[in-house]
Structures are given as structure tokens and as C-alpha cells.
Image: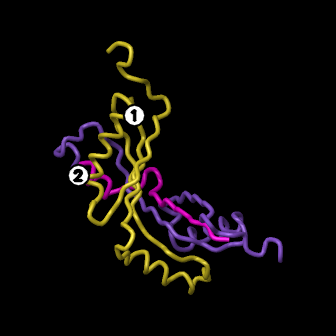
Chain colours: A purple, B yellow
Amino acid sequence: MRFHALVEVRLRAGIADPQGATLERALPALGFESVEGVRVGKAIRFDVDAFDEAAARAEIDELCRRLLANPVIEEADVSISPEPGSMAAGGRAG
Amino acid sequence: MRFHALVEVRLRAGIADPQGATLERALPALGFESVEGVRVGKAIRFDVDAFDEAAARAEIDELCRRLLANPVIEEADVSISPEPGSMAAGGRAG
């Protein structure tokens, strides 16, 4: 079965975010006075084939730990949705 | 009233994504054979003060157009949620 995953990787609270700080400094000059607390993270999307949603989530969690996020300074949120039109593979035959 | 915003900025379909391609090339060597279609975007979070949700959304849409996304190659998804504990300001008095 195929799933679509969205992983949001963001800096942990308290870790300096120079990219967000730069954005925030630019805002008043553009007329945005009421925006604050800007933090910039990554939004990583991909497709994964797995037997079921639990297997997909386990694989994606490991992927986050090993490649996508640095757990010392970053945390990752995972959202999974079944790909439309994807069929459960092997559910009955297996 | 204070809202929390999450803006996902991603490359439009068909625009080359070297960062996603590099990630994808690294996956088989790490044992992830079933992941494909990796695309890397930005997840930008911030707080905004606005009279109501419609006003917040209008301001954030303009912010996306003018600063956060390059509309030629990128598209932006905006999610807004009221900040917990935030009070509607001026709703009755105004």
C-alpha cells in the first residue's frame, strides 16, 4: 500500500534560528507590524510503500532519526495519508 | 486576537528539487528502498495579531506573496489556528 508522508522538521525551542530572525527583521519595513516569533523549518514530502500504516509510520520514524532530522537540535512531526487509488497489497493473499 | 500560522512553501510540480533528489539518492544505501518522490520545502511558523481570522488570513496571504514564497516557482499553503488563551480584542467594545 502506498502512503504519502509529510515530515515537518523544526528547531527545538531555545535553539537559535537565524533564518527566522532575518525574516522577522525584514517585516516592519514591508508593513507587517503584527507578526512575530518567526521560525523556519523544513517540510519534506515523499511517498512510501508499506504493508500498512503502522509499518509506514515505523519506517518514516526511523528515516527521521537517521537522515531527516538532527535530534539534538530538531524535532520532527510526521503526517501520513493513504495515497488515493492505492490498493492494500497482499492483505488477503498473504 | 492572536493566531498561530504555519506556512508550507513548496516547489511547484515540475520545478527541479536538487535537495530532494540528493536525499532520495542517499536512501537506498541506508536501507530505505521503498521511499520515493522526495521534495523538500519550507515550514514557516509565526504568530500574528489580527482582529479576526479573515484579517489574519489576508495579512498572511500578502506576506506569502511579498516575502515568503516566490510565486513563479513556489506555492504556499497556509494553516491558521487561534492561539490558546488569546482573547477576542475589541469584539464587544468596538
Q: Tell me the residue that label 1 is attached to.
A: B53
At 28% from the left and 36% from the top, the residue drawn is A34
Name the spot of residue B37 as percent of width and height, x first: 50, 75
Label 1 to label 2: alpha-carbon separation: 20 Å
Looking at numbered disc 1 in the image, what kind of residue is underneath it? Glu
Q: For residue B66: magenta?
A: no
Magenta stretch holds residue A24: yes
Q: Mark 2 points at which residue?
A: B66
Bounds of the magenta segment: A1-25
Dots 1 and 2 on the same chain? yes
Give percent across and percent down for residue A53.
69, 64
A46 or A25, which lies in front?
A46
Residue A88, given in percent of the width and then of the height, sits at 72, 69
- Write down the chain letter for disc 1: B
Going by the numbered disc 2, the residue's amino acid type is Arg
Q: Is mark 2 on a helix, strand or loop?
A: helix
> Which chain is mark 2 on?
B
**The C terminus of chain A, quarter of image:** bottom right
Q: Residue at x 60, y 65 (%)?
A: A83
For residue B7, say whether it is visible: yes
Q: At numbered mark 1, what does the secondary structure look like: helix, strand or loop? A: helix
Q: Which residue lies furthest to the bottom in this view?
A: B29
Q: Quadrant of the N terminus of chain A?
A: bottom right
Q: Is residue A94 visible?
A: no
Q: Quadrant of residue B17?
A: bottom left
